[in-house]
Amino acid sequence: MRATRPGRPRGRAPGATRDTIVAAATREFAARGYAGAGVDRIARRAGVNKAMIYYHFASKAGLYAAILRGLFEPAGEQARAIVAADRPPEEKLDALAAAIAGRVFAHPDLPPIMMREIAEGARHLDPQMLRAMSGLYHSLASVVDEGQRSGRFDRVDPLLVYFTFIGPLILFLGGAPVRQAMTRLKVAGNWNCEPAALLAHLQHVLRRLLAPADASRPCRTRLRRAPQPRRRA
Amino acid sequence: MRATRPGRPRGRAPGATRDTIVAAATREFAARGYAGAGVDRIARRAGVNKAMIYYHFASKAGLYAAILRGLFEPAGEQARAIVAADRPPEEKLDALAAAIAGRVFAHPDLPPIMMREIAEGARHLDPQMLRAMSGLYHSLASVVDEGQRSGRFDRVDPLLVYFTFIGPLILFLGGAPVRQAMTRLKVAGNWNCEPAALLAHLQHVLRRLLAPADASRPCRTRLRRAPQPRRRA
DNA sequence: GTCTATACTTCGATAGAC
DNA sequence: GTCTATCGAAGTATAGAC
């Protein structure tokens, strides 16, 4: 462990400048998107000279990629550990949901960044990062599959299960500023709830969704192969 | 009905230039966001001179606002009509889901634009448009409330019901390009399903979520007032 | 209504002193 | 590692002819 060098501006420890930049840039990218973010603004936010950003990260794109790596990559390992555990699928599902949600709660910048990255067709994501993102889905899918094979879960397309969980999670948390604006507008009484309540709700939804069906009602949500109906490439 | 004037470039009907610009700009904004979109690129996409955009819309911001108005405002009326109908709440809920989903299916540019606007904290949305957006929620909330009062629906926070529906819808449809990229990467077997299957799934989720609970199990997802746990203003 | 040419600004990136 | 100064590209917007 090295001590802070006295001669350094603001008395920063080695490597601290880099971290400061990453933190500031994460917030800037989350708030304004890749195109909307300004290197000048990031530097001002971080209290760092703009040239330092290029010294450490070579380019705006390099900085952005470094941030995405740090946000997405660690998530997969945690998920894999949960899947590998020796527990009933119901518990694994709850644990998986809690782990993913906990990660997002801890990183409020993640939802806006993910929403934008999705909206942009993952333009800034290299194959490696795409794999990292899909790993989360595969973890959940394998738990769902496990439960379905043993007859403890109803048959529902794992992809739809995944989006049923991740969709509300991301949109709700990323939408907090909008809901605040609506609350200020007196447009509704209560436009928010605690993170813990959101997680409990999503776990509840998954349990009800995957509860074995009554024999009488056929399941309508089966996996289907489909042509792309969208016009954009 | 006026005929096309022969002297006009490309033989456009009056008002057609404006519509052409709107169509091209919608795709550009959906693909690259407000900041990322270029007036030059929009003009090129539309096959129109850049000056015409300023002639019709005064500014990039004006063009964007016009597009948002056209996308968001008509949605609310359809929803209100469904709520007002004399039908059991289960059917209203299904109809509401179908109407909202149908609108999004018909406008593939809507999900990316909404995701970005949410991520940006609705920076480009004026109070009027915020009200238009919240109207959709209020319609669904009143149906949920109706069903809960009559004991046909389980007690779940309407806000969470709303996000449980809209979250997967937006994220799944907006994420189609990303899933295509993942399919190309051979990262998973099937990363897609038909719109109709998605709608059926979401209706199924809502039905199961709102099905009256067994008397034995207490409902954990109640509405709560909460302080803002997020650091961004 | 349409087009050309251009003014003005912002922004990513670099050179070079310290 | 840090800072100042600046270049060049890209982008929004306008003036003015037709």
Image: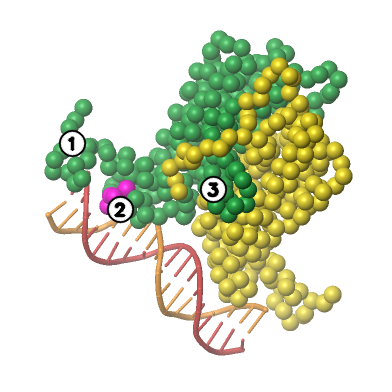
Chain colours: A green, B yellow, C orange, D red
Q: Quadrant of residue A204?
A: top right
Q: Kindly identify which numbered label has been placed on residue A29.
A: none
Q: Nearer the viewer, mark 1 or mark 3?
A: 3
Which residue, given by chain and number where applicable, does mark 3 sit on?
Answer: A180
Q: CA distance from mark 3 to mark 2?
A: 33 Å
Q: Is residue B45 visible?
A: no
Q: CA distance from mark 1 to mark 3?
A: 41 Å
At label 1, counting other C-alpha atoms closer than 10 Å, the crowd grade (few under 14, some 14-19, many 20 or more) is few
Q: Is residue A47 magenta?
A: yes
Q: Disc 3 marks which amino acid?
A: Gln
At horizontal 58% and vertical 17% (from top left) the residue drawn is A92
Q: Is residue A83 visible?
A: yes
- Chain containing the residue with disc 1: A
Which residue, given by chain and number where applicable, does mark 1 sit on?
Answer: A4
The answer to whether residue A81 is above or below residue A20 is above
At label 3, counting other C-alpha atoms closer than 10 Å, the crowd grade (few under 14, some 14-19, many 20 or more) is some
Q: Which residues are magenta?
A: A46-50
Task: Choose between B142 and D18: the one closer to the eye.
Answer: B142
Q: What element does badge 2 sit on?
A: helix
The answer to whether residue B229 is above or below residue A36 is above
Count every numbered label the image shows and give the total. Answer: 3
Q: Earlier in the sequence, mark 3 or mark 2?
A: 2
Q: Disc 2 marks which amino acid?
A: Lys
Q: Earlier in the sequence, mark 1 or mark 2?
A: 1
The answer to whether residue A100 is above or below residue A229 is above
Q: CA distance from mark 1 to mark 2?
A: 22 Å
At horizontal 70% and vertical 14% (from top left) the residue drawn is A152
At horizontal 81% and vertical 51% (from top left) the residue drawn is B81
